[in-house]
Amino acid sequence: MPTTPFLATDVNQGRGHARFLVDCYYQEQDRRKLLTNQIRACNELGEPCEHLAYIAKRADENEDYIRKALTQYSKAHPVGQWATEIIGIAGVLSSGLLAHVDITRTPTIGALWRYAGLDPTNKWLGRGGANRLVNQIVGDDKVTDEHLARISGQLNRKVHLLVPQVQNQDGRVTRESLRRGLAKCPWNKGLKVLCWKIGESFKKQSGNQNSFYGSVYLARKAYELAKNEKGDYADQAALWLPRMSATSKVSIEAYQAGKLPMHQIVKRSCRYAAKLFLAHWHSVYWVLHYKVAPAKPYVFEMMDGHTKLLGPPNFVTERDVISGELLGRVVKRRKGVEETTPWFPEQ
């Protein structure tokens, strides 16, 4: 085992290494939890478990080593320094974002949401859905630009982004390459899991009054509960009801009443907090990388009924009087409080 964790001085250097380490960290974490449960069961049965304890200790050491390595990787980059200042985001989650996302390929916050699987209009067709769509629009004809335009419009994807995904090795788009390309998952699966973990982390931090995104989660949860009680989600409940098994009694009762069950409300609130954080993460990265203000994101509606364009907490910007560039700076939490800032100045 190396004596010191790896350190990359460029965000692009070691990106694949960091991606593998993030996956390895969660694998070791799951292994350590499984072994802990097995040791507990052995103790309850009065059976020896020295070997299990030894393996569990090694898993805990591996987990700690990877966490330190990823924390060092994250703090080597300004955007990672900002992310690790956020309550609920530590080195592993921050490194995962840096490893998965290339800011030059995600020009807008919406593009990042789509890449992370957080855009509900972005559907995964699968093999069956891809075959049906190609048969419906292309049929037995050769694939034309008109066909691609119709498919991209139906899937809410841009043509110039769709074409590289459906080309064959020769750079041509055939019916078969179109089917294969459309059947692929249109988002980054690893990044989507990472965003789910981020939302869950903010839910766990919601009891901390200093947590900005924890308070966002609570506000959104209250908003979702109020809409649910008014029956605003009755149409969605009707769609979910036929998909429930007979054992999901609590969910079935909620759907029959025209409401979403509590676990759905919690998931929606976690996803909302994660999407806001991801918007702020992208904006901070954009300012630090391009030194210009990012495009304004979707306006988030907050609990008090007003529309607010919230800037990232723990981050301030100022104009360089000579070059006119927008300079960003990460600030430390004062007394543990995450302070919000106004949105970035207009370009």
Image (cartoon, rainbow, N blue to C red):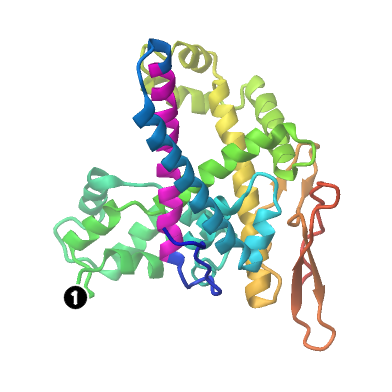
- State the image coordinates of residue 179 (x, y, percent, origin top left): 22, 56
Left or right of residue 109, residue 66 in this image: left
Which corner quadrant holds the C terminus? bottom right
Nearer to us in this view, 198 or 265: 198
- Taking the spot 38% from the left edge, 28% from the top edge, the residue there is 50
State the residue lying farthest toward the bottom.
322
The residue at 61%/67% (across/down) is: 76
Q: How many marks?
A: 1
Q: Residue at x 62, y 42 (%)?
A: 272
At x 17%, y 66%, the residue is 142
| Residue 314, quarter of picture | bottom right
Depth check, front residue: 70 or 283: 70
Task: State left or right for residue 53 relative to residue 128.
Answer: right
The residue nearer to you, when weighing 82 against 69, is 69
Prevailing secondary structure class for the magenta stretch in the rendered image: helix
Q: Going by the image, does 64 lie left or right of 89?
A: left
Q: Magenta residues?
A: 16-42
Whether residue 27 appears in magenta in the rendering, the answer is yes
Q: Label 1 is placed on what type of residue?
A: Asp
Pinpoint residue 78: horizontal percent, then vertical percent.
66, 67
Query: Extreme left residue here?
Result: 140
Q: Is residue 333 magenta?
A: no
* Among the 4 quarters of the image, the one containing residue 330: bottom right
Secondary element type, mark 1: loop
